[in-house]
Image (spheres, rainbow, N blue to C red):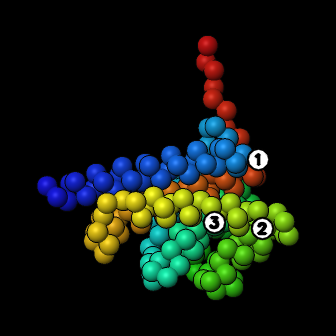
Amino acid sequence: MKQDNGAALVERFEEQVGEDLMGFLRKKGAVDEVTPQCPDVEERWGMIARAYLPDGAREFQNYPTASLGWMMFIGMAMAFYWDQDWENHADRQDIYESLRDLRGFDNLDEAITESVLGYEGEAAAAVIDLVADCAARAYSLLRHQQVEPGTQEAFGCYIAALHQLYLAGMAMQLNALGYHMTPLNLN
């Protein structure tokens, strides 16, 4: 029974993080009311998460917002790859490692923003600041969860936050690339 309660807690938490991030990004004008989706990029989540977790979990203790925020940058990079050259990136198993190795884990934000997405100067700083705000929001939500650190539920909530940050990064970058979703009026 306790395991079922833990799974439900993690699921509710993931919904909460997703709603919070999308609401915040809408207010900032970084995504439209209807957020773009990309099943190709969404399907890569599991592979990306497995590769990222050893680095992200290790860094979480001392640098929680970086550990969380870097995943949003990865979601942005994946959306960019999907738009620009998915044929060459769709089956790659080393995408996370190649992004990390551009400038090292500590500089993943700048590496993706500048070297992959091509932002410079104030535009790069604005993207980095927006992602930092999103990571801080996710961390605040994580800290306010009533879960004991080091438990399966705590780890599940961490992964849930990473997942929603990945999806938020993907949506934000798709929006920046011009993918705007509008509801269909079938009447």
Q: Kindly identify the amino acid type of the residue bearing the numbered disc 1.
A: Gly
Q: Residue at x 71, y 77 (%)?
A: 111
> Are circles 1 and 2 on residues that touch, CB within 8 Å?
no
Give the mark, 1 or 2, whose residue is nearer the N terminus. 2
- Element assignment for label 3: helix
Residue assigned mark 2: 125
- For the N terminus, the image quarter is bottom left
Residue 72 horizontal side relative to residue 46, left or right: right
Q: Could you say which is closer to the camera, residue 39 or residue 136?
A: 136
Q: Residue at x 74, y 69 (%)?
A: 113
Residue 49 horizontal side relative to residue 146, left or right: right
Residue 140 horizontal side relative to residue 24, left or right: left
How many residues crowd mark 1 within 10 Å: few (<14), some (14–19), many (20+)? few
Residue lying at the far top of the rendered structure: 187
Residue 111 in sight from this viewpoint: yes
Residue assigned mark 3: 132
Q: Position of residue 43 (x, y in %)?
A: 50, 58
- For the C terminus, the image quarter is top right
Residue 178 is labelled as 1
Residue 163 in sight from this viewpoint: no
Q: Kindly identify the amino acid type of the residue bearing the numbered disc 2.
A: Ala
Q: Could you say which is closer to the camera, residue 35 or residue 129?
A: 129
How many residues crowd mark 2 within 10 Å: few (<14), some (14–19), many (20+)? some
- Element assignment for label 1: loop
The residues tagged by marks 1 and 2 sit, at their Cα atoms, a distance apart of 20 Å
How many numbered markers are drawn? Answer: 3
The residues tagged by marks 3 and 2 sit, at their Cα atoms, a distance apart of 10 Å
Residue lying at the far left of the rendered structure: 1
